[in-house]
Amino acid sequence: MNLFGFIVALYMFVLSLTLIKVSAASLGAGIFSLTRDGISGINAFGLGWLSTLITQSSGAAAATLIAFNLAGIIGPIVLLYMIIGTRIGTSITALFTAFLIHAKRRDFRHGFEIGLANLVYAIPIAIIMFLLEFFTGFFHKIGDSLVVFGPLFKHNIIDIIVLPLIDLLSFIPDHLNIIFGVLLLIGSLKYIPKFMINIWGEKYLKKK
């Protein structure tokens, strides 16, 4: 049962990303396009932070932004700043949660320690990445140097698996499909770890 649930959640994860990408591409990059010429790195960082606050998940926010990039809505340089923003956003949000949620003194201390440790780990890395990209374009240059070959496969197996279901949702407006895709993404990211823990837990108990 847990294995079946894991497979379904994993399929929903892939489906949500493809749905966001296809729907965003249908809307057209000309309607809303974020490129280096249209938005500064600082503003892109802030938008990444905001996307984490809205979705309440840095993983969901980052995956959604990458899907927008694949659809041509977000440029590669802007995407990097946004990803850094999602990482800092989720770290600071976790720290704020320790202050805002009423709990026992002991639980507060443990929650604060975890949030602070997460923040101390994330901020130095994010600052280094931000400064490297902002002043030297380090990561963008590496990405350009790696884009040498075309697609390895003519047919994308992921599209083959999920596009038939996406075609069934084509009657829904694209902007609503994007919202639905984000919600589906958040839900799948919530349940995938739970099913994985249950599966590993069962194997561990059987060995005992």
Image (cartoon, rainbow, N blue to C red):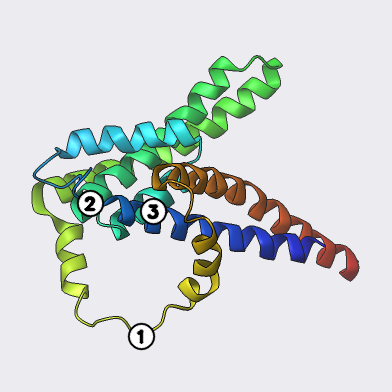
**In the rendered view, would you say 144 is above or below 182?**
below
Q: Residue at x 25, y 50 (%)?
A: 74
Kind of residue at badge 3:
Ser
Percent across and percent down for residue 123 are 35, 38
Secondary structure under badge 3?
Answer: helix
Work out whether mark 1 precedes mark 2 in sequence or the reverse, and give the earlier one: 2
The residue identified by callout 2 is 29
> In the rendered view, does 26 fall on the left or right side of 57?
left
Q: Which mark is residue 70?
A: none
Q: Which residue is drawn at 56% across and 64% down?
A: 165
Percent across and percent down for residue 119 are 43, 35
Kind of residue at badge 1:
Lys
Residue 91 makes an appearance in the image: no
Q: How much space separates mark 1 and mark 2, taking CA atoms?
A: 24 Å
The residue identified by callout 1 is 154
The residue identified by callout 3 is 23
Q: How much space separates mark 1 and mark 3, taking CA atoms?
A: 22 Å
In the image shown, does 180 or 70 lie closer to the viewer? 180
